[in-house]
Amino acid sequence: MKYNFDEITPRRHSGCIKYDGAALMGKPEGLIPLWVADMDFPAPPEVTAEIMAAARRGIFGYNLVTDGYATAAANWFADRFGYRTERDWLVTSPGVVFALGLAIRSQTAPGEAVMIPQPVYHPFARLVTANGRKLVNNGLVYRDGRYEIDLVDFEEKIVTHAVKMFVLCSPHNPVGRVWTADELTAMGRICLKHKCLVVSDEIHCDFTWPGHRHHVFAALSPEFAQNSIICTAPSKTFNLAGLQASNIFIANKEVREKFAREKSNAGAGELNNLGLVACQAAYEHGRDWLEQLREYLGANLSLLKSALAGTKVRLIEPEGTYLAWLDFNALGLSAQDLDDLITARAGLWLDEGAKFGPGGEGFYRMNLACPKATLEQALTQLNRALKDGR
Ligand SMILES: Cc1ncc(COP(=O)(O)O)c(C=O)c1O
């Protein structure tokens, strides 16, 4: 192994929300934090080296998106997913969440309906309602330990509520689905038929588990490309979220111009220069690191599976993302007792499922992107709490 993912990098008192945000988030101090989706691994050394070189130049003035940057981002998606983009489709954004807000504000009017598939990454719902749009939920169907889209409900809701935009989470956080080409095509066709724009959040695209393949929504057909906004970022893949660089691909000129105008009206200019440097370096030099990381995460997933064997906690077999979605409902505990089990007795900080909307009750999301020793300790604590609770 070229990279050492076993090494523990201390993060407490570094100002990171994952470890230092307990008081802010109303949690007790000292829990093992396996919640927010960032990793306890340093970014690839090849990326840090480029950041250091830029820092040594010491000038942090205004930047532009260079051809080198745009090519690195375009090549990443062309090589890995067969998604071929053109230079002018790219609009940068300081974050995918920011881009989702821009998409909602630029392509829909207040009072119009925006549909999301809950349980889903919680800012989706907040962005819709905070911007005065009507929230429509095409709830995922949980059957035999697996989540599916109810396509009948999908179309009915679009028609009934005159839904103008569907925000897709692909791969899906938190349930871990990697949508198949058939599923995406079915959703895409319905959206085309009813003139509903698809905003596809593909921030987790680089984390698919063996046997599953990510499809960029816009790569499935030229019509889909014209009816979509594709949100990507190197932030999950290479642990760069704090550098705030994301790449939004919009093939449709009219949609893109509205989106870019909204960005400009929000006062956002070009990305910060270290974010640009890091993103380009990651896409140019980060492949080996990512491949090794994916293997490492696979071993962490196996650890989780062994730890849960013989318990009543059910792991929803993930197809993508480094986030495990755990069903605690068979324990028959109230929300309060479950929180007590996870937080007070197991000493863990996980994301409670209800945060992701209806259907999340009784579930917790566990972030597996940490050194093995951290995960082992967390699983030991969880198992002990589960045994004590019997
Ligand atoms: C589906 C999804 N979208 C967006 C984000 C955050 O993106 P950003 O930090 O670029 O705003 C996350 C982070 O967990 C996520 O899971």
Image: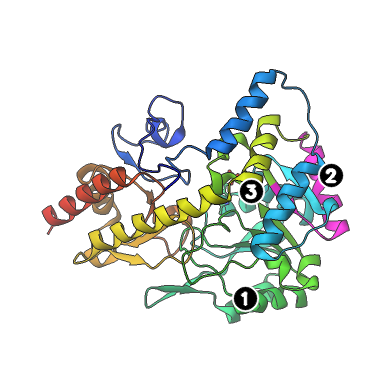
Asked if ligand 1 lies within 8 A of label 3, the reply is: yes
Q: Secondary structure at mark 3?
A: loop
Mark 2, mark 3: which one is toward the viewer? 3
Which residue is at 67% across, 72% downward?
A: 158
Look at mark 1 in the image and give the residue it sits on: 181
Q: Which amino acid type is marked by label 3?
A: Ala
Which residue is at 68% across, 58% downward?
A: 77
Which residue is at 68% across, 67% downward?
A: 217
Which residue is at 72% across, 48% downward?
A: 72
Q: Earlier in the sequence, mark 2 or mark 3?
A: 3
State how far apart marks 3 and 1 are (Cα).
21 Å
Q: Secondary structure at mark 2?
A: helix
Q: Residues within 10 Å of mark 1 (few under 14, many from 20)?
A: some
Above or below, 308 against 93 in this view is: below
Q: Which amino acid type is marked by label 1?
A: Ala
Q: Which amino acid type is marked by label 2?
A: Arg
Magenta stretch: includes residue 150? no
Q: Are marks 3 and 1 in contact (CB under 8 Å)?
A: no
State how far apart marks 2 and 1 are (Cα).
32 Å
State how far apart marks 2 and 3 are (Cα).
21 Å
Q: Earlier in the sequence, mark 3 or mark 1?
A: 1
Q: Which range of residues does the magenta coloring cover?
A: 247-268
Please provide percent x and percent y for residue 244. Answer: 63, 37
Residue 233's label in the rendered image is 3
Magenta stretch: includes residue 262? yes
Look at mark 2 in the image and give the residue it sits on: 261
Q: Is residue 95 visible?
A: yes
